[in-house]
Amino acid sequence: MKNVYACPHCQTVLNPSVKILLVVRYKKHRGMILLSPQPGNFKFICDSDLRESLHHGALLSFSCPVCSKELVSDQDDKFAELSILTPGKKNRRVEFSREFGKEATFIIDGENIATFGSDVDEYSGKNFFGS
Ligand SMILES: [Zn+2]
C-alpha cells in the first residue's frame, strides 16, 4: 500500500502524486526537493545549483511547501520529521537524517521502530519515543 506523507503542522499531503515534495534550504541556497516515498530509497531530485552546493555532512533544512514550517524532529534536531497517514490507523512518524549523504530513516508507530539505510547503526541507542 502507498504511504501517504503529510506535514505534521498543517496535515497537507506532501506526496499527492508519487514523490514527496519539500522545500530544502542550505545556507543561501533554497529550492524544491523530491524524495522517494519508499523508505530506504535515498535518491532525490533537486535543482542543479542546489545540488552542486551540497557536500557530505551538509545539514539541510526541510520545510513544508504549504505552511512553510520547519520539518524538524522534536527528538533530535539533526533529523527531519513527517507524518505518515494510514486510514483507520494511528498516524505514524518518519524521521530522516538532515545530513546530506547520511542514510538513516526511522518509522515510528508508537510501539515499534523500523529502520532504513546504511547509517542507522550510528543511532542504535537513540530514543525516538521521547521520554
Ligand atoms: Zn505544513
Image (cartoon, rainbow, N blue to C red):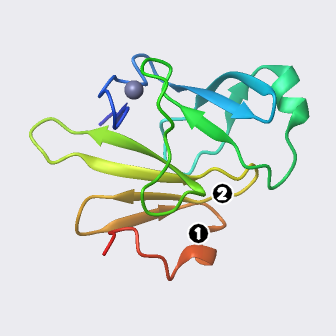
Is the residue indicated by label 2 positioned so its CB lies within 8 Å of ligand 1?
no
- The residue under the point 66% across, 67% down is 119
Which amino acid is tagged 2? Answer: Glu
State the image coordinates of residue 120 (x, y, percent, origin top left).
Answer: 58, 69
Residue 103's tag is 2
Q: How far apart are marks 1 and 2 (CA)?
A: 7 Å
**Compared to 83, does 14 lie above or below?**
above
In this picture, residue 93 sits left or right of residue 51? left
State the image coordinates of residue 44 (x, y, percent, origin top left).
Answer: 67, 33
Residue nearer the viewer, 6 or 87: 6
- Among the 4 quarters of the image, the one containing residue 57: bottom right
Ligand 1 - quadrant of the structure image: top left
In this picture, residue 41 sits left or right of residue 111? right
Q: In which quarter of the image is the N terminus?
A: top left
Q: In which quarter of the image is the C terminus?
A: bottom left
State the image coordinates of residue 26 (x, y, percent, origin top left).
Answer: 76, 36
- The residue under the point 15% across, 48% down is 90
Q: Dot 2 lies on which element?
A: loop
**Compared to 91, does 122 lie above or below?**
below
- Among the 4 quarters of the image, the one containing residue 67: top left
Residue nearer the viewer, 32 or 75: 75
Q: Mark 1 points at which residue?
A: 120
Question: Is mark 1 in CB contact (under 8 Å) with mark 2?
Answer: yes
State the image coordinates of residue 72 (x, y, percent, origin top left).
Answer: 50, 47
**Compared to 121, does 89 lie above or below?**
above
Which amino acid is tagged 1? Answer: Val
Q: Which residue lies furthest to the left in this view?
A: 88
Residue nearer the viewer, 116 or 47: 47
- The residue under the point 36% across, 67% down is 113
